[in-house]
Image (tube, coloured by chain):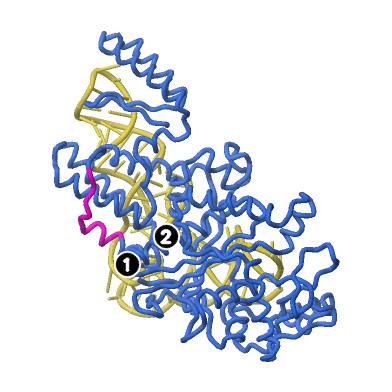
Amino acid sequence: MYLFDSVTKTKRPFIPLHEGKVSMYVCGPTVYDDAHLGHARSSVVFDLLRRVLMGSGYEVTYVKNITDIDDKILNKLSQTGQTLLELTSYYIERYNTEMEALNCLTPTQMPKATDHIDAMVHMIHTLIEKGFAYQSFDGTVYFDTTQDERYFSLSHRAIDESQTQSRLEEEHTKRHPNDFALWKPAKNSHEIAFDSALGRGRPGWHIECSAMIESTFGSQGEYAIDIHGGGADLLFPHHENEAAQSRCATGVELANFWVHNGFVTIGGEKMSKSLGNSFFLKDALEHYHGEVLRFYLLSTHYRSDLHFFEEDLLASKKRLDRLYRLKKRLYGMASTALETPFQVELLEALHDDMNTSKVFALIDAMLSHANDVLDNDPKNKAIKTQALANLAYIERVMGLGSLDAYAYFQFGFSSQEIEAIEALLAQRHEAKKAKDFATADALRQQLIERGIAIMDTVDGTKWERA
RNA sequence: GGUGCCAUCGCCAAGCGGUAAGGCCGGAGCCUGCAAAGCUCCUAUCCCCGGUUCAAAUCCGGGUGGCACCUCCA
């Protein structure tokens, strides 16, 4: 597989550190608010990478951290009056539920920052001992960026002296403007803080990843882990700082591959009304099935920015619908693990730095072909078996098409509504039998107005949510 | 201001030196009581100007226009 690495800024062949195994660490959410489409994209992108690696025969350990202590969380707490655990566990649960709706596999582990304070403190001590960190007069421990000769090797940033100079004056507790906090002293006794040999306080943001990666994966060999992922906004300073801390504390580079996904932006002037003028995942999920969102988030190459337009989301929905229609067409048949050229091509496209656009083109072609053959030869067993195996493969590797085909098309309807729909359908059936097409068409019109599309087939009338 | 990314059909989007994938929308047809679904067919020379090359959307230089990071951020 070829993967783009942010350090070398090239696509290069992915070779795992340990044969047959892949270690992945992805920066997860800070749990103080609902997840938005950006979080969703990151989750989906790295879930896909994980699935591709699994599909390539690797045993993947996929770790995603939870930042459950930081300024924003403390801020929120002061507003809500909740305890730290009440707040964070609420958002962690919501996050997990929403990611599940996007068909993201549950991470192998989801370590929380507050469970690893000791490991962080330990690493900070090591950094101080090795001369890579210092404690300022106010108790803050800073990482000394001037001591790390490879600082900026990830973000490829150049230091602008004139600009850094001005900032230095404001933050006079640190020696160099690029230095960042490893440990922040508690401001008062009410603030949530942890007692440690560094004083009462809490860790800086970046140290949690370095410490948790070390305690989860160890730090031997040339790199601690195979792949470190996250949004492109984390490249600097978060990942740069993580990389610096880890290499200085352990003597081992953090990751062989640094993978970053692009942003989700709201393009154009107006936001989508039906999504409630926001792009929170929970709102999107009310109107669209999670798989539709997953499809949409994957329709643009993961490193490009994705400008959110509901119109485009709709196009993704239509494309996914087509996949489910074939699945519905094959309903009731048992799937077999048949290998097909289609699957090989699909994996090949994914091996090219996850060329999902190409994947979708391949899927469309596969669907057309299967439908075409079935149109002319409805009993063609070979094509059915093949198509079914292909759909199963898409489900496994892409995380798409996992639902019951009928359930997918009834998304968003309550059982009462479904009953009502079927009653109307029965009436229409009677009208049609009596050749009363005017009544039949009027009933159909009623259904269309309720957002339902119907289709008459040899197996009776089918309906779908439009 | 510094650094970096991008610019392909009405819209979304592949392409990574060899003569423009795919989807949405639109049009024509088959099927249908009519539809829907499905299938078939049709629609671009790649922001502009130079250059390199037998050959460029693809490489180089210069414009123009977007965007991102430099502060919390997926």
Can you name the residue that lies furthest to the bottom here?
A130
Looking at the image, residue A233 sits to the left or right of residue A169; the answer is left
Chain at numbered mark 2: A
- Is residue A339 inside the magenta stretch? yes
Q: Is disc 1 surrounded by few (<14), some (14 to 19) or many (20+) residues within 10 Å?
A: some
Which region shows up in magenta? A334-346
Using the image, tell me which numbered label, if any, was put on residue A56: 1
Badge 1 or badge 2: first in the primary sequence: 2
A151 over A100 or under it: above or below: below
- Whether callout 1 and callout 2 share a subunit is answered yes
- Rendering coords of residue A336 (x, y %): 21, 51
Q: Is residue A237 visible?
A: no
Name which residue lies at 28% across and 24% down.
Answer: A456
Q: Which chain is tinted blue?
A: A
Q: Which chain is tinted yellow?
A: B
Q: Secondary structure at mark 1?
A: loop
Name which residue lies at 60% across and 47% down.
Answer: A280
Quarter of the image for the C terminus of chain A: give it.
top left
Q: Secondary structure at mark 2?
A: helix
Chain at numbered mark 1: A
Looking at the image, residue A175 sits to the left or right of residue B60; the answer is right
Label 2, on which residue? A48
Q: What amino acid is at disc 1? A: Ser
Looking at the image, residue B40 sits to the left or right of residue A64; the answer is left
- Rendering coords of residue A432 (x, y %): 28, 13
- Rendering coords of residue A193 (x, y %): 76, 67
Given residues A378 and B63, the one toward you in this image is A378
A52 over A195 or under it: above or below: above
Given residues A351 and B25, the one toward you in this image is A351
